[in-house]
Amino acid sequence: MNNAQIPLALEDQGVEAPEGELHLLFVLPSGDEFALPAAGIREVMQQEPERITPIPNASPLLLGTINLRGEIIWVADLGQFLGYPNMLNTDKTEIPVIAIEEQETILALAVESLGAMQWLDVDTLQIPQNVPDHIAPYVQGEWVNEKNHYVRLLDQIAILRSARWVA
């Protein structure tokens, strides 16, 4: 048996520890890019449209329900919820869905496409500029890079507690 020491610390391997907090990036049908904190995400999945059961007389913001390991969860079109006119294309083999959770409440948000998980420094979060009124209550801030590309951070608790669900 070889007793050689194996370096376990990240610094020993020349890898820097990440800074900031982990976020999931995603895009809505409008082309706008958003992020959600990983801590508030229960699960990320690709859902087949035929596995989303439409519910008659439900809010038009809701696509229907899914069965997530025996738990019935509502699936919402996040773009429609935020007030964007672009409808989510559900005529495809799989729909990206992000299940968010706060206490005992779970809601699945359907989006156009999923991005990567990234460590984003919340200390560099800026006050959102030129945010449409319809999304302002749900945006905590934004990151802007040198090419003026921005990613807006959504507040999943504000989304879950919104009065728009009962309208």
Image (tube, rainbow, N blue to C red):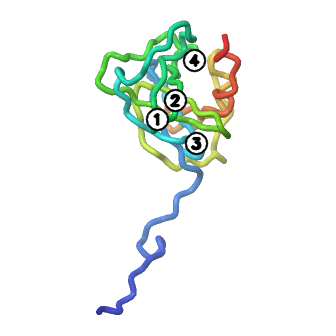
Looking at the picture, which amino acid does disc 2 mark?
Ile
Q: Amino acid at mark 4?
A: Phe
Which residue position is annotated with label 2?
72
26 or 103, nearer to the observer: 103
Between the residue at mark 2 and the residue at mark 3, the CA separation in whole angstroms equals 23 Å
Labels 2 and 4 touching (C-beta < 8 A) = no
Mark 2 or 4, closer to the camera: 2
How many numbered marks are there? 4
> Where is mark 4, residue-wise?
81
In this rendering, which labeled residue sits more in front, label 1 or label 3?
Answer: 1
**Label 3 belongs to which residue?**
37
- Regarding residue 98, the answer to whether it shows in the image is yes
- Where residue 83 appears, as percent x and y from the top left, is 58, 14
Per the image, label 4 sits on a secondary structure element best described as: helix
Helix, strand or loop status at disc 2: strand
Nearest to viewer (mark 2 / mark 3): 2
